[in-house]
Image: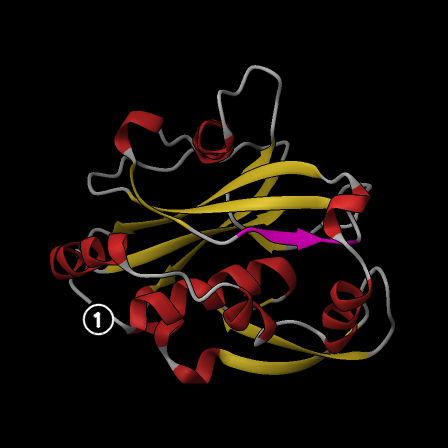
Amino acid sequence: MNFNEFYQRALNLKNLPLPGEVSHHKMSPALRIQWLKENKIEDANPKRAGVMALFYPDLEEQTRLLLILRKVYEGVHSNQIGFPGGKLEVQDKDLLHTALRETHEEVGVLPSTVQVIKELSEVYIPPSNFLVQPFMGIYPNPSPFVKDEIEVEQLVEVYLRDFMDDSSLIQENLSTSYAKNINVPAYKLNGYTVWGATAMMLSEIRELLQQVL
């Protein structure tokens, strides 16, 4: 989709209610849904994080969504696809500040150049005990991305049309940090399998966009 058309339609998202947990469950392994039924998130005293789902025009004025492939490191999210973002730090005013700061650090996007159009539903990640606040932003006049060589292995620039295509939805047998060989709903985007919390956030974004595109 042409970016100018997308931009005008995306502005209509501001007043739409969030699909929330209903959309998250569509991309959740059964084990995760069961865990949430049996446990209270507040009892885990989770760490907080903010991430940014960034939409922008490419050189042909087609709409893209930015994901990143994280570096291999000692941690449960090593070498996974996610959004730019990270942990709430003491100096951050709020979680939006966190998401914008981390997006700047990880891919070089200045906070002042991002138009935030929607605060999305929180997603809890049991293996790392993070409660993540996602935001949806528009980057209308992009400069070349500058990836953080320490944290980011690869930029994954997804066409909006591919993300919205039903053929991107798959089921895959995966071994996770908490289970082996389980059937997991996921997206196949740019050749990468996108699952877990990122897939849940994408599910909510996709349902919102289906209402305005």
- The magenta stretch spans residue 207: no
**Residue at image location 45% in from the left, 65% down from the top:** 204
> Mark 1 sits on what residue?
213
State the quadrant of the C terminus. bottom left
Q: Is residue 26 above or below residue 140?
A: below
Residue 10, percent from left and from top: 22, 57
Residue 129, visible in the rendered structure: no
Residue 128, percent from left and from top: 77, 46
Residue segment shown in magenta: 122-126
Picture mark count: 1
Observer-nearest of 16 and 161? 16
**Residue at image location 86% in from the left, 63% down from the top:** 178
* Magenta span dominant secondary structure: strand
**Residue at image location 53% in from the left, 72% down from the top:** 22
- The magenta stretch spans residue 124: yes
Observer-nearest of 161 and 184? 184
Q: Is residue 109 above or below residue 34?
A: above
116 to the left or right of 197: left
Q: Is residue 39 above or below residue 51?
A: below
State the quadrant of the N terminus. bottom left
Q: Is residue 210 above or below residue 66?
A: below
Observer-nearest of 112 and 208? 208
Observer-nearest of 160 and 126? 126
